[in-house]
Each structure stands twice: as C-alpha cells, then as structure tokens.
C-alpha cells in the first residue's frame, strides 16, 4: 500500500471522528441522551482520560487530575509521532497491507483524540447544563487540558450477574457500559488486527525475502511485464536450488554472476541470522515444494492429501499472488531449506496492550456508571 492511500484512510477516519464530535459538542448538553435503539444510544460524555474514559491517575496514584491530564496529552503527542514514523517506514519497506491498515487506524484514532485533548479546551466553552459554543471569548480550560468527546453507547445487556461469578457475582452489570467515539473504535480495531492477523502483519523474514528477489528481478531486467509474479516464483525456485549448491545449466536468471552470487550470499546470511526456533518441523518428511494450480504443494501426494497435511501443519496455502502476499508465498517456497515452517510469533507489546485494555475497561465500568447515571 502506498503512503497516499494510508493518508487517505487516516483523513477519512479523522474527518468522521471530528465531524461527529463537533456535532455532538454544538448540539448536545453534557449527558444528553438519544435512544436510537434499545441497544444503541447517542450519549454525550466527556472524559479527561484514555480510551473508554479511563484516566492516568486510575493507575498511578499520588498525581492530580490536571497533572495526569497534561502528562497524558503530552504522551499522546509523542506517541502519535512515533506511530507516524512506524507507518512511514512500514510503507517504505513494502510491509504487508494488513500491517499498514492497522497502523493507519491506530494513528488516525490517536490523532483524533489528541485534537480533543489539546485544542477543545480553547475552541469550546463548557457543556454543563448548556450546549457549547464554538470559538467563544474564552474556552473552558487552557491548552492541553481539553476533554475527549464520547457519544457512542451500546447497552446491549443489563442485569445482575450470577452469584457464582468470582468478585462480581450479584453486581448489576451493563454490557457494554463504556461510552466511546470513532477514534476509540479505530484504535481498538487497529490493535485487534495486529493481534488476529499477527502472522501476516509481522512476516519480517518473508518481507525481506520478497523485496530482495523482486528487486533483483527488476534490476537485472528479468522481470516479465505480462506476469511478474510467475517470474518471481520461478526465480525463487532457482534461488532455492542455488542455496543447496544446484544451478540450472542455462543460468537464465544470472545466479552464477557476481550480482547473483551476492544475492544468494545475502539470503543465506539472513537465514543464518534467524533464531534456531524460528522454524519448526511440522510435515512428516522433507518436501520439495512447487507452485501447482495456484497453491504451494509438495510433490508425491494427491492435492487433497497435500492440503490436509499443510492445514494440519498450520501452513497457509495461497492463491492469486500479488506483491503484498508474495512474502508468505516465498517463505513457504523455501521451506525445505530447514524442513520447517514459520512459527507463530506474537509481539509482547500486543499482549501488554491487551492487559492494559482489559484493566482500562474494568476501571471504566465503575467510572461510567457514575457519570452516565
């Protein structure tokens, strides 16, 4: 995905987020509610904190609300700069589309809430007991002390929890209690995509391999204009043989030339850098992989036997190649070098984000009960 497309995604989300917040702020008094359906309400709530209305001092005791608010706003600004850098570098590296989509969603959501936190305090006056005015003579607070506007409420289920539930049994509970906004949805969706599609998003070795082979084919003039993906697939097969010391007699792709040998050496070095547990043997025997009928299949078995074996091994079978999914295809094509498969890797930061999100959600349940009612 190009940087222009990523910026377009960010712009659309940011536009929807800010239009919805501006409308709520200039048409609703604080805590005004419109019941669209039994399970969906438009409810105007403001908060000084993070997603789902939690505050920094909910986790760190001993700091005032204003200090926590200022620290959170400044942290958001630094974080969104870092996320923006991550997005730009991911685009330049031709990372998988799923990763760029996720980063763009997180960036858009973070930026949307930063606008509230930084500027709304001077762009609007108070909403307590009145509808706020845009660009008043004086705002409701100073710069960097704005409150995030939330309005989406989904009280899908209400009732007392069963007594057998530890700690919360017998308590009155609403699912889903927190009030949130479009920016919160974008952040949560982006993080969810990184967790669910982790293997596709963080395929670093496959990404390196894809770009290396693709660029070599273009640079040496071997890339087919009519079907570049077949070129890359065929070239990858010859690279696989060359890594095992075997070369095609005609050496069509010039792998015996100094430039070709440099490519082979680079790929071999990257393979040697991989941790010993990066690959795990899952298929019963070493397989010679080839491209067959739009899928990567071993020789010597029927199609169904191969598909069953690969599915049992957790190997993704790809068809309809394009440059964005080529990395996974190339990685599977070179699988017989190590007789294994790419193991599933979950970044520890995503696990931490999940824990923090769960804690924030539980804390916000109690907070929103007080604010909404």
Image (tube, rainbow, N blue to C red):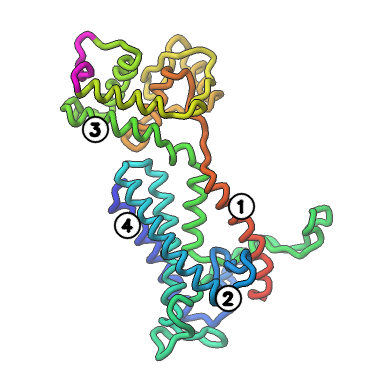
- In this rendering, the label closer to the viewer, 3 or 4: 3
Q: Which residue is mark 3?
A: 215
Mark 4, residues whose alpha carbon is within 10 Å: few (<14), some, or many (≥20)? few
The earlier-in-sequence mark between 2 and 4 is 4
CB contact under 8 Å: marks 3 and 4: no
Q: Main secondary structure of the magenta part?
A: loop
Q: Where 303 falls versus 109 (above or below)?
A: above
Residue in front for this viewpoint, 166 or 270: 270
The earlier-in-sequence mark between 1 and 2 is 2
Left or right of 270 in this view: 360: right
Q: Which residue is mark 2?
A: 65
The earlier-in-sequence mark between 3 and 2 is 2
Q: Residue furthest left?
A: 221
- In this rendering, the label closer to the viewer, 1 or 4: 1
Q: Which residue is mark 1?
A: 355
Disc 2, SS = helix
- In this rendering, the label closer to the viewer, 1 or 2: 2
From the top left corner, tell me how far across and down residue 33 is, in percent.
Answer: 58, 76
Tell me the CA gap for discs 3 and 2: 53 Å
């Amino acid at each position: 995905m190009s940087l222009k497309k990523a910026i377009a995604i960010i712009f659309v989300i940011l536009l929807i987020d800010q239009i919805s917040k501006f409308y709520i702020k200039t048409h609703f008094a604080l805590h005004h509610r419109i019941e669209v359906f039994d399970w969906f309400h438009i409810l105007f709530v403001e908060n000084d904190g993070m997603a789902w209305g939690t505050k920094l001092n909910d986790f760190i005791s001993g700091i005032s609300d204003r200090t926590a608010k200022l620290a959170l706003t400044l942290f958001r600004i630094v974080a969104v700069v870092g996320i923006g850098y991550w997005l730009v570098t991911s685009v330049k590296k031709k990372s998988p589309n799923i990763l760029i989509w996720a980063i763009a969603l997180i960036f858009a959501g973070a930026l949307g809430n930063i606008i509230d936190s930084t500027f709304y305090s001077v762009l609007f006056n108070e909403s307590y007991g009145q509808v706020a005015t845009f660009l008043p003579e004086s705002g409701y607070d100073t710069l960097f002390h704005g409150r995030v506007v939330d309005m989406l409420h989904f009280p899908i289920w209400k009732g007392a929890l069963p007594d057998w539930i530890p700690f919360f049994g017998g308590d009155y509970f609403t699912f889903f209690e927190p009030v949130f906004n479009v920016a919160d949805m974008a952040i949560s969706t982006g993080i969810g995509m990184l967790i669910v599609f982790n293997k596709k998003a963080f395929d670093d070795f496959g990404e390196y391999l894809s770009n290396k082979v693709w660029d070599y084919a273009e640079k040496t003039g071997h890339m087919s204009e009519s079907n570049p993906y077949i070129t890359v697939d065929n070239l990858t097969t010859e690279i696989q043989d060359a890594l095992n010391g075997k070369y095609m007699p005609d050496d069509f792709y010039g792998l015996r030339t100094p430039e070709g040998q440099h490519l082979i050496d680079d790929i071999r070095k990257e393979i040697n850098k991989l941790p010993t547990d990066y690959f795990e043997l899952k298929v019963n025997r070493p397989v010679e992989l080839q491209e067959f009928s739009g899928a990567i299949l071993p020789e010597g078995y029927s199609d169904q036997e191969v598909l069953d074996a690969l599915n049992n091994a957790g190997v993704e079978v790809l068809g309809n190649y394009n440059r964005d999914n080529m990395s996974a295809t190339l990685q599977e094509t070179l699988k017989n070098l190590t007789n294994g498969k790419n193991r599933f890797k979950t970044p520890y930061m995503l696990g931490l984000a999940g824990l923090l999100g769960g804690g924030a959600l539980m804390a916000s349940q109690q907070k929103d009960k007080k604010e909404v009612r």
